[in-house]
Image (cartoon, coloured by chain):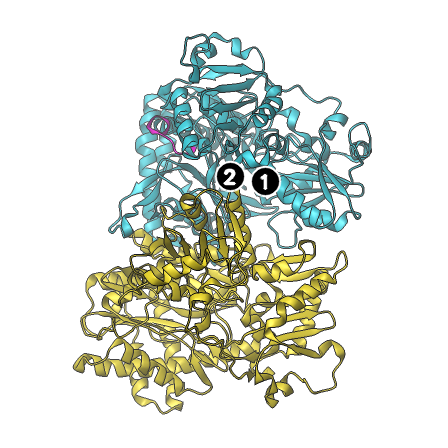
Chain colours: A yellow, B cyan
Amino acid sequence: MSPKITTELLKQLRQVMKSPKYVQEPVQAYIVPSGDAHQSEYIAPCDCRRAFISGFDGSAGTAIVTEQHAAMWTDGRYFLQAAHQMDNNWTLMKMGLKDTPTQEDWLVSVLPEGSKVGVDPFIIPADQWKRMSKALRSAGHNLVPVKENLIDTIWTDCPQRPCKPLITLDPSYTGVSWRDKIVALRSKMAERKVLWFVVTALDEVAWLFNLRGSDVEYNPVFFAYAVIGMNTIRLFIDGDRMMDPAVREHLQLDSTLEPEFKIQVMPYGSILSELQAVGAGLSPKEKVWLSDKASYALTEAIPKAYRYLTPYTPICIAKAVKNASETEGMRRAHIKDAVALCELFNWLEKEVVPKGTVTEIIAADKAEEFRSQQKDFVELSFATISSTGPNGAIIHYKPVPETNRTLSVNEIYLLDSGAQYKDGTTDVTRTMHFGIPSAYEKECFTYVLKGHIAVSAAIFPNGTKGHLLDSFARSALWDCGLDYLHGTGHGVGSFLNVHEGPCGISYKTFADEPLEAGMIVSDEPGYYEDGSFGVRIENVVLVIPAETKYNFKNRGSLTFEPLTLVPIQTKMIDVNLLTQKECNWVNDYHQKCREVIGAELERQGRHEALRWLIQETEPLIRVQ
Amino acid sequence: MSPKITTELLKQLRQVMKSPKYVQEPVQAYIVPSGDAHQSEYIAPCDCRRAFISGFDGSAGTAIVTEQHAAMWTDGRYFLQAAHQMDNNWTLMKMGLKDTPTQEDWLVSVLPEGSKVGVDPFIIPADQWKRMSKALRSAGHNLVPVKENLIDTIWTDCPQRPCKPLITLDPSYTGVSWRDKIVALRSKMAERKVLWFVVTALDEVAWLFNLRGSDVEYNPVFFAYAVIGMNTIRLFIDGDRMMDPAVREHLQLDSTLEPEFKIQVMPYGSILSELQAVGAGLSPKEKVWLSDKASYALTEAIPKAYRYLTPYTPICIAKAVKNASETEGMRRAHIKDAVALCELFNWLEKEVVPKGTVTEIIAADKAEEFRSQQKDFVELSFATISSTGPNGAIIHYKPVPETNRTLSVNEIYLLDSGAQYKDGTTDVTRTMHFGIPSAYEKECFTYVLKGHIAVSAAIFPNGTKGHLLDSFARSALWDCGLDYLHGTGHGVGSFLNVHEGPCGISYKTFADEPLEAGMIVSDEPGYYEDGSFGVRIENVVLVIPAETKYNFKNRGSLTFEPLTLVPIQTKMIDVNLLTQKECNWVNDYHQKCREVIGAELERQGRHEALRWLIQETEPLIRVQ
């Protein structure tokens, strides 16, 4: 992977930063965040402005370009990747390390007195704007909105914004009709005494209307906003897709409906002016509810006194707690996904060990092939991380021809992959060795496994926030002086984004909502040795009520049930480092894989994969 | 303990809330925080305004009185105590429980439109003012400063503000002279480009000048402020105590000194006007550093543009990391303290078991008596919690004649106590049974012990914040559906406040600073069964570097060394619930108690207590 040469681009950007055609006054710095106008984590090609200007195309990062400098902030998952993809014009700012300055502190340290810092107001979330603006102001600078996106002005071959057909989901998948979701939302609005709710996140729009799309790769969403009033529903969406009879039927666009369920379809680009009109028409005490992560542009459309901002919207919270139909769908999706992976791993063992002709890309493609054979498969849920040896230490690695290594009997192989099925979203990581792992590799793998089990088997009171569980995943690594520089888990959508809020498991104490039964998160501790190998063990787990001996203050307890049912390679386990309880956990888990996935492999007539499954789920025996 | 009758007092308070003599406009609510003008946790009798108006005298709580309601917010430690001490005029707001409203939300729900909420601006910290003011404003109300404290206007027999003699500490205790502390502080000020630093917390003033006082019971502090400039030192303090030759000599008040070390002594009451004068004389870019917990009154004295506010001051952080002299002093103090407790527990066993004449108060007094026999004993570090049976479930219980129970062979006894010695501060809890504990009592005790060990033996990377360790203390309890409603640990001062920032171990993710070697915290998980018993096991522990097999990213690791060396009653332990590692921890700990405390008991000729120590530290044997 050779870095993108950005000298010319940066020169052009610095010119438009001073051009009266685009800015009222020159800006001395320009911020290029990761996101799109919906603060999406995964974005469409037309929104990959940060990747365009820097070359770094990981999922998280913020670029800031000043007259003299160009700097990129990203987190531990991407340190190596960003360093590879960016040329010498760029300084990498490693977030999470002690000496790395914040964006604000860095700007203050490099800017000349009284500078203007520009940003696209549609791309920056209101809460970030506020923090950044305050920090800059207190140092004598100013954050200013630049209406025209300056990257777009120099991006001559920028792709079109996608506008793909929609998929309608009936209540057998979603459990609840969109009408009932609107009713529930309005009741939350009434509780908080707000008259309007603005849906800005793409997955929230999709969830609310029981629609899916494919405007953004891996995330089954479509470009749209919605504004819900107590008696009105406005959907801002472009293209012919609203002419699709199935969509019209689903949304009852042509039916005689009670007026409060009549959906008004409006152009995507009219959201700002419509919202400004809503804002202008408010009487005192009338409030408009927005996420505090909504864009600065849309937030500013509502006068400050009328805004009701919360870190998580009622849709975000309702979406996170899966109902019975969604949970059953997620179970089905994970069974199908496990079938595909058993096929893949069986195939890999047969190909890698004797032939040595399988590359990371071939393995990733094969994984997709097996997944695509399963019912209701839609697409992958993220770019497959298929990495062997040193590539495994690049946490969010994606194999490309320049980096593509061949799997061998000498190196650890890490596969982090998942898919979108119409009934659910999967995300699973397995780390394996096709030859004989070293004692050190087994030791590290076993510490990671102990952390994985510590979270998965944890019992904790109702109302516990996920971040309180993070250290359980690290304790075995910490005991030996090891650690990993990423969080332990993220929320997972139901045939929606593979990363979703408001819950997660991380040492970062973001304002996560308490875990409750029905939420679904990943459990994925790891260990990465730069230049050598990476280990990660990831299951998607469902929060379920736990039976406990006592019940303090009648609070009730919770624990996790793994939805992912794919064997964990026992060859990699140093069984003497496990406690008897941990050993039992592995054996019980493998027994369940045998029963559930074995039955499905049998049903699908996949006998070779079944043989592989049986062989891989032999019980561990711990020598006392 | 019968509740305080507050009907008449509340009537009087509601009158002055409307009296033009005290308020420009009537206030519909009046907030009575816990603290004094220094935001102290422990306060002098003249500052116990919340206890005066409500009867509830725990260390944490905020009262709010409206025209119709009177409500008290406090945390899990005090639910039972507050319920006992307050009459029916008061509603108890149990902080930390799911359905308890915040003060702001509650005010908004009960206040008539456009209300004014009053508070003494010297008593409310600036950060709380800001949050409260914003929340009230957004609901159409106003937070207003009321200069005269309204409680003081109705408190006819309010005690005088204390003004006791000072103790000077030479560098053999403090490790660093006050001049060197000023030099270090000025270098931190220069780093942050601030010209002035305002010392508002009493323990910070005491630490900075290597002085101690006794204005506040249990906390060796004195009422004072300090304002440090780059070339000036102003100490705001009242009374004859600055005439004491030892103090004058210590502060070099009569010496010919470089002007930047010359201390100007000013009246305590002149801080506001002096600070306003400083504020008025500032040029652009000149900043004044204050804690964001300083009072609203003092913070407002500095115009907003000139304020530099941080959650923790450089003094707070420097004070938390103990130097070699302080650490050695803390070790000595804990050895003496353990000697006193061995004497006490030996005495209790001889008195309680055959005679049954020892009450909670007698036991507490006896503990103080044994402590006072030790060298450099000054006073207790907090009110001794001496509680038996159901009283043990009142987390911050203090025995009074009305509640005083007699220790017996049938109930669990919990003693949480500590002392101030000139060389250090102690805080230790032991829970014991003088007869035969039930299986359930032993089970609960053992879960608490497992939690205590999990924290004490934890190894974690440099830079880890204490709150990431909190769940380790709860895991064994959680597994059985149990928990406790308080944090796991707090910072401990060095012959200073027994509770100090900026580090701690708690599920509340306050902005704690990362743990570093030299910090000292408590490790005190518990379990409380209302109406039955309480269990808590508390050691004071020192953060020390840990040796680990590997060293990820060269970050280094930390762990804890217990400074408290008092036997943990093995009779209360269900050894079959311990892992072999936990069992070894207990045996190693007891071996150290024998060696270190045994030697000191021998040296002090306390042979009976030594016999008791030997008997109590017999190794546990775990049946495999």
**Quadrant including the N terminus of chain B:** top right
Residue shown at 37%/34% (left/top)?
Answer: B563
Amino acid type for the residue under numbered disc 2? Pro
Q: Is residue A54 visible?
A: yes
Looking at the image, residue A567 lies above or below residue B86: below
Tell me the residue that label 1 is attached to: B127
In the image, is B209 to the left or to the right of A121? left
Q: Quadrant of residue A351?
A: bottom left
Residue shown at 70%/57% (left/top)?
Answer: A306
Residue shown at 39%/82% (left/top)?
Answer: A597
Return the chain for callout 1.
B
Dot 2 alpha-carbon crowd within 10 angstroms: few under 14, some 14 to 19, many 20 or more: some
Amino acid type for the residue under numbered disc 1? Asp
Q: Quadrant of residue A356?
A: bottom left
The kind of secondary structure element at disc 1 is helix
Residue A596 position, x and y percent, is 41, 81
Return the chain for callout 2.
B
Residue B41 position, x and y percent, is 57, 33
